[in-house]
Each structure stands twice: as C-alpha cells, then as structure tokens.
Amino acid sequence: MSNRWKSSLGFILLFLFPVYCGAEDAATPPRVYQEVGALVEDLETIRGVLGIRAPRERSFRLSEAEPRQVFFQAQTLFRKCNSLAQEIAGLSRQVAAQAPDREIRPADVLEVVQASRQQLDYVRDALNIDTRADLPRLNRRSTPSDVMHDIIEAGYIINEMVHEQPDWASIYDRVKLMITYVGGLHPEATRYPELPAFECCKQPEDVYQSLLAAMEAARPLAESVDLPIVRIAPRKRAEGGASPSTVYDLTTTMVSDLAELTLRLEAEDTERPNYERPSRILPSHVYQLASVLQQMITAEGSNVGR
C-alpha cells in the first residue's frame, strides 16, 4: 500500500469491527440501501426519545458514486455512531480496522453500516428502547449514489445529537493532505504556490463551495485515467449554509478520490507544504488552502490532452 493511502487512512479510517457474516454475493447496493434505511429509522427513534430537533433541511443529489467513495463515507458514519454510543451509553472508542487492500465492494460497505447499527443498539439499550427497525422493502433500483446520499443524511441526524463535532483544525489538515497529494504531480521547484491573501470572515458555506469547485476541477484529470468522481448537486441551500460537519463529510470523499487519482497518475510521494500553521484555525484559513488546492488541480488539469 502506498504512502498516500496510508496517510489518508490515518485521517479517514475510523473505528469499526466486523459483524457481517453473510455471503458476499448477496451484498448488492440495494441490500446496503436497505440496511441504511433501517439505520435511519433507528436514528429517528433515538432522536425522538432524546427530544432533539430535526436537522436543518438541505436538499442535494448525488450521482456517479462508486463503492470506494461510499465506503469511506460509511466509515465517517460509523465514527459518528460510535461517538453517540460513547456519549449516551458510555461505550469505549472502538478498535480501528484497515480498509481492504483490494477493490472495495458493496459487501465492505454493508459491513461498516451493520457495525454502525450495532453502535446504535448500545444507545437503544441505554435509553430503554425495545424496538429495532426492520429492513424496509428491497428497492432493486438503488445505486451506490443512493446509498451514499442516505449515509450522509444519517450523519446530519447524528450531528444534532452529539456534542463532539469536527473542528476546523482537522478540516485544515485534510485539505493540506490533499494539497500534498496533488503536489506530487508538480515539479519540485514550483510544487506549492504561495498562499493567497487572507480573506476575513469566511463562512463554512464559502469553504464548502470552494472545495466543490476543486472537486469539479479534478474531473478532467480523473476522466483521463477512467476514475469516477462523485457529482454533488445541491438542490436547496440549508438555512445558514453548510456546517463544519458538512465540510468535513465532503473532505472524506475528496481525500479518498485524490489519493486514488494521484496514485493512478503516478505522483511522487512528497513532503507536505511548509505553510505556517495558524495558532487558531478559522474557516478563512481553510478557505486559503482550498483556494491553493483548486489552483493546483486546475493547473494540472490544463495539461490533460496536450
């Protein structure tokens, strides 16, 4: 496994343990979608018992998702479920597991989702909830994009229930890691551009949109090596815009995509850029890095086909 995958897993591989023992050929995207649907129903029951308000409405559509992208988003969901179990049931943080050292399959995603439901079982027991959601009817048209969409939606529900939220420092480090991946495609002498001027008062929504733009800029590069990159199309802006958790969830997908993309493009393993780290990291600092990331990807993408 390359250094870039080891490094990315250090950020996005989370705490889970195997609970799935079924036949792998039964783990299709519709089957995984079933499990996510039951998980969401369990979450809504827990939310009602706790008296927590529903998350802010945000409508978006996903397309072109692959099991690889869904897997890493499912790992983020697991961490959130584990955080909820720690807060409500006093459960310990679970042992981290490695991603399979092969192509990721729907069975791998199903395993993580089922492990997440087990975390919620501890929460239900602590709250004396004696009902567990049944699997909804199988929808054979469900795609990996449908699965990923509802995993993200489930994460939004948990965000309202847990006190521990992603901080801007962790998001900053993820964006810096992505810059490092892309830097391996550039000559050493001009590898990392200078930071743009600091712009005060940026909001999470500004960072989210800047990262989305960087993701779109990477599409020509991805197409040149036949790598699918998920498309995220917001339909309705949530009241107040994106939250730090929303930005963090986006970086989960981006880190895995850029790790795979730069691996296929045979990028060098490089040292991280020597940008001075702020003592207190604000959204505006992350916005600076996101701007650099977009600039570097755009410059590399302009060389495609030449």
Image (spheres, rainbow, N blue to C red):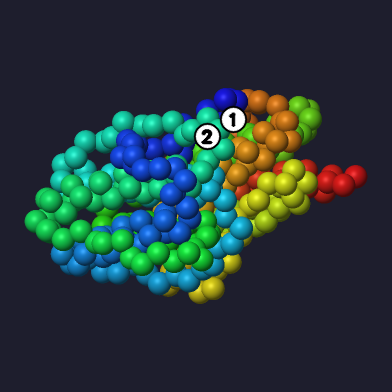
- Disc 2 residue type (three-letter): Ser
> Residue at 26% across / 36% down in the picture?
93
Image coordinates for residue 205, horizontal then vertical, percent: 51, 62
Along the viewing direction, whichever of 163 and 144 lies nearer the viewer: 144
Q: Are marks 1 and 2 in contact (CB under 8 Å)?
A: yes
- Disc 1 residue type (three-letter): Arg
> Residue at 74% across / 43% down in the picture?
225
Q: Secondary structure at mark 2?
A: helix
Q: Is residue 227 above or below residue 13?
A: below
> Residue at 40% across / 48% down in the picture?
110
- Quadrant occupied by the N terminus: top right
- Is 65 left or right of 196, judged from the image as shown? left
Q: Secondary structure at mark 1?
A: helix
Give the quarter of the image for residue 177.
top right
Q: Is residue 119 above or below residue 183?
A: below
Along the viewing direction, whichever of 194 and 21 lies nearer the viewer: 21
Q: Pointer 2: residues within 10 angstroms few (<14), some, or many (20+)? A: some
Residue linked to disc 1: 4
